[in-house]
Image (cartoon, grey):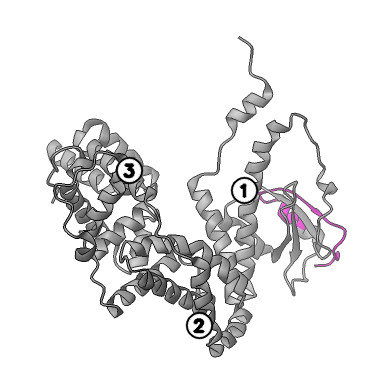
Amino acid sequence: MSFSDERFADHREAWELIPWVVNGTATDEERTLVHAHLVGCPDCAGEFRVQSELQATMQGASTPEADAAASFLKLSARLDSAPAAAATHGRRFAALTGRRAMLAVIALEAVSLIVLSTAMWMRGPTLGVAVYRTLGADAEVPRHATIRAVLDPALSLGDLQAMLAELRLQIVGGPSSAGVFSLAPEAGATSVTTAQTVSLLRSRAGVRFAEPTHGGTERR
Amino acid sequence: MSEPDNHTMRATAVTLPRPDQMRLSTDSREAALLCQVAAGDRAAFESLYSEYFGRLSRFLGRLTTRREVIEEAINDTFWIVWQKAGKFRGSSLVSTWIIGIAYRCALKALRRNAVVTGAAMAAAEVPGYEPALAEEREDWVSQGLAHLPIEQRSTLELAYYLGHSCQEIAQIMDCSVGTVKARMFHARVKLRNLLPTLAGSVPKDHS
């Protein structure tokens, strides 16, 4: 492939990637490629500007006026007139209350931890006075929780899910204002003691702190 | 010059959550709502409906201007969400799943109501129309989009208004990534020819 062929291939690739760089969904590698190409290609630089303006215009466009509440009432009436469909919900819920529901709660809690950590970090300087809290000062620990833990905010959701599944733990509370999660064993997980589980948690890179609550049962 | 105090230094070190973290946050919240919907929780269902109503109205408003067709498509979408919430397997974002349903419902509603979308909406007003003011651009772009086939218009709307990736749009529109790229390519070329003022120059031929 000649130098000019290579340049043409780069140009085509960059041109094709521009919308995804503009809308922020391109990968880091794709973004780097496009921005490097834009420096020496006025055509693509112009196209990037056009697509950015198009996106800005489309994002700013007004939404047609509509009454969500009135539309929902119509849908509710439709749901109410279909009792057979409602009855199936109970059965589906039975299938959902186990692992999927737990994963959704874990996902929500993990995200809460990230958002809360950011919020706490941002709030800190405005207080002017350092406020020290001990983890033990948190009174919001559910009665059935056996372990309190502080997780590394960098811990990915997938790793968190895998770790909890492996240790047969579930999140039953938190994160508290101090960022403490309350954990409890899954139903039927009785072969390992709380102390052993705490020890295993402490050995994990994504766990900053773990201790028994003393409120839960000692045997898992 | 005095040194910055600790508070100033901490304030400059603050980093806001990245867009992908915000997306994860939104998806987790919506996944939790979907779990509640699967359990038959009407309040959660209404919350989810309210969150999506505006977005879907706007997205479907690009496909038709008829309010009753838009409402019909949104309610058909959420009828399916209510029925199928328990079958959502998390293989995509919740938003990708719901908007994919909405796209299919909209196509059905348009067929059912025999709505002529592009030509009727466009009214052949674009050529020669060169708005000088930024406020007029929205109107102008709307007219340009109305000249595009429904698949190309939807691709642009999904990418630029709803912010979906190429792969997510392929899931929503139930087609290959290559098809999404081709639709985006043709949409851009056609818009550049239709909207030379936005392009700021004579359109280049990339076809």
The mark lying in front, picked from 2 and 3, is 3
The quadrant the C terminus of chain A occupies is: bottom right
The mark lying in front, picked from 1 and 2, is 2
Q: As displayed, is residue B25 above or below residue B132?
A: below
**Image quadrant in which you'd find residue B200:** top left
Near-viewer residue (B138 or B176): B138
Chain letter, disc 3 residue: B
Q: Residue furthest right?
A: A214
Q: Residue furthest bottom?
A: A84
Task: Where is residue A62? Give x, y as percent.
Answer: 39, 53
Marks 1 and 2: CB-CB under 8 Å?
no
Residue at 31% across, 42% down: A53
Residue A52 visible in the displayed image: no
Q: Which mark is residue A210?
A: none
The local secondary structure at tag 2 comes to helix
> Is A84 placed left or right of B112 in the picture?
right
Residue at 16% across, 58% down: B124
Residue at 56% across, 84% down: A80
> Is B88 placed left or right of B180 in the picture?
right
**Image quadrant in which you'd find residue B101:** bottom left
The amino acid type, in three-letter code, at marker 2 is Arg
Would you name the residue on which mark 3 appears?
A: B135
Is A217 contained in the magenta span?
A: yes
Chain letter, disc 1 residue: A
Numbered range of the magenta stretch: A198-220
The amino acid type, in three-letter code, at marker 1 is Ile
Would you name the residue on which mark 2 appears?
A: A78
